[in-house]
Image (cartoon, coloured by chain):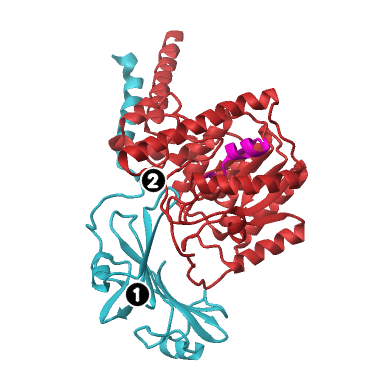
Amino acid sequence: MTKRILKITAAVLVTLLVLFALQRVLTPKYVSEAQDGRLIAEYYSSAKNHDVVFIGDCEVYENISPVTLWEEYGISSYVRGSPQQLIWHSYYLMEETLKYEKPDAFVFNVLSMKYGEPQSEAYNRLALDGMKWSASKVDAINASMTEEEEFITYVFPLLRFHSRWSELKAEDFRYAFQKAPQLSINGYLMRIDVDGVEELRKGQELADYSFKDICWEYLDKMRLLCQENGVKLILMKAPTNTPQWYWYDQWDVQVEAYAKEHGLRYYNFLKNTEEIGLDYTTDTYDQGGHLNLSGAEKLSKYFGNILVQELKLESHHGEKDYQQVWDTLCAQYEQIRQTQERLLAENGKLTGFTGLD
Amino acid sequence: MKKYSIAILLLAAVLLLCACTGTTPDTTGASGNSNAGASDTPIGYLFTYNGLEFGVDMPAADVLKALGTPKDKYTSKSCAFNGEDTVYYYSSIQVSTNNEQGYERIYSIYLEDDLVSTQKGICVGSTEAAVKEAYGEPGSKSSDAALIYEKDGMTLTFNLKDGKVTTIIYNLV
């Protein structure tokens, strides 16, 4: 009888191991495609002693350089960004971050106020699959799922990705049981190339400029969460110059009124491009959609000065715990920059982000 | 052999699971590079420009060729998915396309001045009453700021200010 139980147990264990291995192989690694899907998970290996944590979509992870904030002001920061991060993703990432550390401030980029409903499963996956399991992740999944999605597929991704078997690449096996190389520098994704734009783009007129109730609800939740935890909430709008992600004055007025009503600081950097020194002919790599390294460093230098004043931050330069970590990060930043310079010289263009691989 | 039966059965189930053809979330932004399966027929309300009739949800290539060189063009990648969006700027109109499905498809036509009009003669500057007379009662999503008409999975929106049309948009829902 005991022998039979042992055999059954062994059979079940073997099956579970096979299923686990299959799941590891079949789950996307975001190495050659949709690289920014690796961003959320990279946070867990960072030092959790940040003065400022930026939360939001590509307007934070491509436009804010933590290394510049460190080098210029001794500010320790991290960017918890993911592609088209929606406001409920941001809220739960903020909640989760507070379980690891209590920064002086969260800076939330407000572009996602324009999205009142889940946009696609793919973006949910990029924001949620990288999160460690916690109550925040469970709530985030429940808040984010599109009608076609099922919670169980987040618990067992094999159920969702099993049909990738015919699309598998070498990277799926290579990184099945080991981490893919680090892509970001504290959440920042670098692009050094230039594809500028001469004129200022304008968005197409909209039928309705009001933000959806759910966006206001989550902004309220963020504000209260920060209040309860003694963390300052700062709102920002990154400078971009595209018709697709145009930031309308009608939206700006609403965010400004909210910030004023609740005593929050709101910085719309679209209004300060001259002071920042931004030049859309040289400081963007995709005709105004996102800033390149030159633009991100200018914006970070400008914003860093504000953060120092606003939060009364003191430089951590020379503090052993910080200096060691940031020396490494600065060297990695330089390494990525040099890699991109080499690729640019060899190929005449960059086709994606490069990390420490 | 019997002792392995459970494991064999379970593994068979796993292999079956892997072999079945579910839908993989799009992690590439493009699912092909042809427009096979796409219909050349536009849906809903159509638009005529320089004698060319077209609409949303149709392949853009032939339309763009017929429209000639745009005054300006702007292409942007989505953050990670859904291919590239391109806006083509012509005199009086903007045509927006997306190549998510591996080929450029028109998803929006934007009329910005009174040199062009809809097939029912409405242009920028027309009154709200004229729009209603031409198109009937608007859909439920309409407001004081816009009259919205839905047809065959697309919308025709007349944005209004002080009772007059300011812009007109043909949009894929």
Q: Which residue is mark 2?
A: B25
Q: Secondary structure at mark 1?
A: strand
Could one spot residue B87 in this view of the protein? no
Pointers 1 and 2 within a single chain: yes
**Residue B142 in the image: x percent, y percent?**
52, 77
| Front-lying residue, B152 or B47 | B47
Q: Sequence-wise, which precedes: disc 1 or disc 2? A: 2
User: Disc 1 marks which amino acid?
Assistant: Gly
Lateral position of residue A111 relative to residue A229, left or right = left
Residue contact at pointers 1 and 2, CB within 8 angstroms: no
Number of labels in the image equals: 2
Q: Quadrant of the C terminus of chain A?
A: top left
Q: Eyeballing the image, is A348 above or below A270?
A: above
Q: Position of residue A341 (x, y in %)?
A: 40, 37
Q: Is A245 colored magenta in this rendering?
A: no
The residue drawn where x is 30% and y is 60% is: B104
| Residue depicted at x 63% and y 36% | A70
- The residue that mark 1 highlights is B44
* Visual hue assigned to chain B: cyan
Q: Chain of mark 2?
A: B
Near mark 2 (Cα within 10 A), the count class, few <14, some 14-19 or many ≥20, is some
Chain A's colour is red
Residue A99 sits in quarter: top right
Dot 1 falls on which chain? B
Q: Is residue A203 visible?
A: yes
Give B173 or A354, whichever is nearer the viewer: A354
Classify residue B13 by image quadrant: top left
- Which secondary structure, mark 2? loop
| Gap between marks 1 and 2 measured at Cα | 29 Å
Which residues, given as a range, are shown in magenta? A61-78
Q: Amino acid at mark 2?
A: Pro
